[in-house]
Image (spheres, grey):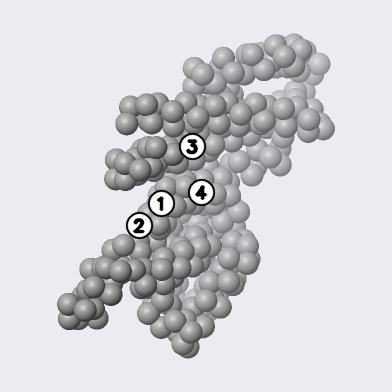
């Protein structure tokens, strides 16, 4: 098990290095000068900023400096936000994205398991047809479309009933989180529903299900204790990467609903060509995703020893 764990951690570190390198090369391939902003009002200020961030050195030397700072956990200072470190931006705003992502993955997991079980139970019947149509819709339509539609629906509901049923945008209370988390979790819910349905249909034909029926167990007991418990395992497998994807993937949703999460700052950094924020948040997001994948692999290594042999 130690060898298996070490191998997963080593491959994760290589993946993070590749993400960091690809991000560095991509940012230097983007046209434009990151110092051409309101900070660099004079050539002297631009020269000082270039010296501070190593932009006056060859790319190879900049890359070494970048990796050295990254290993120390230092992503530098934002080019556009005065006297604010990238580490502080991540520390202040990632908890907001994480809270929204946790609620979204909760909705997605519960909904995916429920709808997937129902579609398998009523296979090729009306509930299965309706739910699978909605699943295809949830996978096909981008999240920003659902975000805009969700806001429009909230505005109309608030106007119809002349009350503030739920906040249209903003952050601060649990009510502000409900609609954005639902919008953010729809795609994952659709994915988990399809996965749960396929898993349930495979379990139905297994020998232990036929044995349970032959023993005279009630259909409800077979469904909950045997089919559902075994079919949910593949769903658990993808939950780790999906948690990371939802937690770090709400860029547009946060922007539409004016949520002060890390994704919103990432989008602003791209628009303003803020090199340090873009590279810092990209590496942070990538490392978080890799960590979740490794965690799931290690947990599965404990649950199923056969995984360690792969």
Report whether 135 appears left or right of 291. right
In the picture of the structure, the residue carrying the numbered disc 3 is 290
Q: Earlier in the sequence, mark 3 or mark 2?
A: 2
Element under disc 4: helix
Q: Earlier in the sequence, mark 4 or mark 2?
A: 2
Q: Earlier in the sequence, mark 3 or mark 1?
A: 1
In the picture, the disc for residue 296 is none
| Camera-side mark, 1 or 4 | 1
Q: Quadrant of residue 22?
A: top right
Element under disc 1: helix
In the picture of the structure, the residue carrying the numbered disc 2 is 233
Tell me the distance, in whole angstroms, between the alpha carbons under discs 1 and 4. 14 Å
* Vertical comparison of 113 with 213: above or below: above
Report whether 215 appears left or right of 98. left
Percent coordinates x, y for residue 48 in the rendering = 71, 12
Percent coordinates x, y for residue 241 in the rendering = 47, 47
Residue ID at (21%, 79%): 214
| Camera-side mark, 3 or 2 | 2
Element under disc 3: helix
Tell me the distance, in whole angstroms, between the alpha carbons under discs 3 and 2. 21 Å
In the picture of the structure, the residue carrying the numbered disc 1 is 237
Percent coordinates x, y for residue 39 in the rendering = 71, 25
């Amino acid at each position: 098990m130690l060898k298996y764990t070490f191998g997963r951690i080593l491959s994760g570190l290589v993946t993070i290095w590749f993400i960091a390198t690809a991000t560095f090369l991509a940012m230097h391939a983007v046209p434009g000068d990151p110092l051409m902003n309101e900070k660099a009002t004079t050539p002297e200020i631009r020269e000082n900023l270039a010296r501070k961030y190593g932009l006056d050195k060859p790319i190879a030397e900049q890359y070494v400096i970048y990796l050295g700072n990254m290993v120390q956990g230092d992503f530098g200072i934002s080019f556009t936000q005065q006297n604010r470190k990238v580490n502080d931006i991540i520390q202040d705003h990632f908890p907001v994205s994480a809270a929204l992502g946790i609620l979204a993955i909760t909705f997605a997991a519960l909904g995916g398991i429920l709808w997937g079980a129902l579609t398998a139970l009523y296979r090729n019947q009306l509930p299965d047809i309706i739910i699978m149509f909605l699943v295809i819709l949830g996978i096909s339509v981008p999240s920003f479309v659902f975000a805009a539609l969700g806001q429009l629906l909230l505005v109309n509901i608030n106007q119809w009933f002349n009350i503030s049923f739920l906040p249209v945008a903003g952050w601060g209370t649990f009510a502000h989180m409900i609609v954005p988390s639902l919008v953010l979790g729809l795609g994952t819910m659709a994915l988990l529903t399809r996965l749960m349905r396929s898993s349930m249909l495979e379990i139905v034909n297994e020998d232990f299900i036929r044995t349970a029926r032959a023993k005279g167990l009630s259909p409800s007991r077979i469904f909950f204790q045997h089919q559902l418990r075994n079919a949910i395992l593949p769903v658990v497998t993808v939950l780790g990467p999906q948690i990371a994807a939802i937690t770090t993937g709400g860029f547009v949703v946060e922007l539409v609903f004016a949520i002060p999460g890390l994704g919103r700052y990432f989008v602003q950094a791209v628009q303003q060509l803020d090199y340090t924020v873009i590279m810092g948040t990209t590496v942070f997001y990538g490392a978080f995703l890799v960590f979740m994948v490794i965690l799931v692999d290690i947990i599965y290594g404990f649950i199923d020893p056969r995984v360690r042999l792969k």
